[in-house]
Amino acid sequence: MDLVTSKRVDRPPLTTDRVVRAAMDIADRSGIAAVTMRSVATELGVQPMSIYHHVANKDAILDGITDLVFAEIGLPEPDEPWRDAMRRRALSARAVFVRHRWATALVSSRTNPGPATMRHHDAVIGNLRAGGFSVAMTAHAFALLDAYIYGFAVQEVTLPIDDTTDVAELAAHIMAQFPAGAYPHLAEFTETHVLAPGYDFGDEFAYGLDLLLDGLAERLAADD
């Protein structure tokens, strides 16, 4: 065995899927701005020109990882009641956006949707229509749900709190910058709610989601 052969590293063949998944791994670790043709090539251990055989450019990679994001979000099951389906889909989407903290801004900006993206939107619309929503009400419901899901996800991933944060210490630091008694309602809210044992801002998602679904159900019944 010659020296070149002995040093050769066996790698799986390069494919479009491997390129796109490598880009997603980079985004998860370092943010979407870190995704470049060169960084993806480095991640895969190949020369940058090699990946051009599988993706045309960086935009194609971003379109690809957008489709991977939508592929991770749970779809309505056949004949699943619309409320159950929309609740499950919203909880799934929120979990995906927390897992991929860069995704909320990206998925709304792409103009070349892939098959998973198209399948996702078609399934949501189809479930609402089967549940008795008119086309106009389907548009209202879809927009309202996505505004809530995306908005909550953006807020959740940008809050200065994570698993390593001492919430009490952070709250004390913030309140200490202002005169005592200057903001009594905020102080009460912080002390009795935010600093309560087991507090998790993410728990608010399900509460708000149920209120939203209640409103849609009420409006749907009124339109019958």
Image: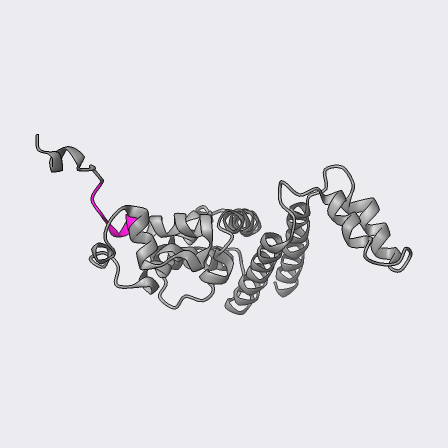
* Residue bounds of the magenta highlight: 12-19
- Name the foreground residue: 135 vs 201: 201
Image coordinates of residue 7 in percent, x first then y, are 17, 35
Does 201 appear in magenta? no
Asked whether the viewer can see residue 12, the reply is yes
Residue closest to the eye, 224 or 119: 119
Horizontal and vertical percent position of residue 190: 80, 49
139 with respect to 23 (left or right): right
x, y (%) of residue 92? 52, 47
In which quadrant is the N terminus drawn?
top left
Residue found 62% across the figure and 57% down from its top: 155
Q: Residue furthest front?
A: 3
Q: Furthest-left residue in view? A: 1
Left or right, 189 with reference to 122: right
- The answer to whether residue 75 is visible is no
Q: Nearer the viewer, residue 176 or 11?
A: 176
Residue 13 inside the magenta-drawn segment = yes
Q: Classify 161 as above or below 178.
A: above
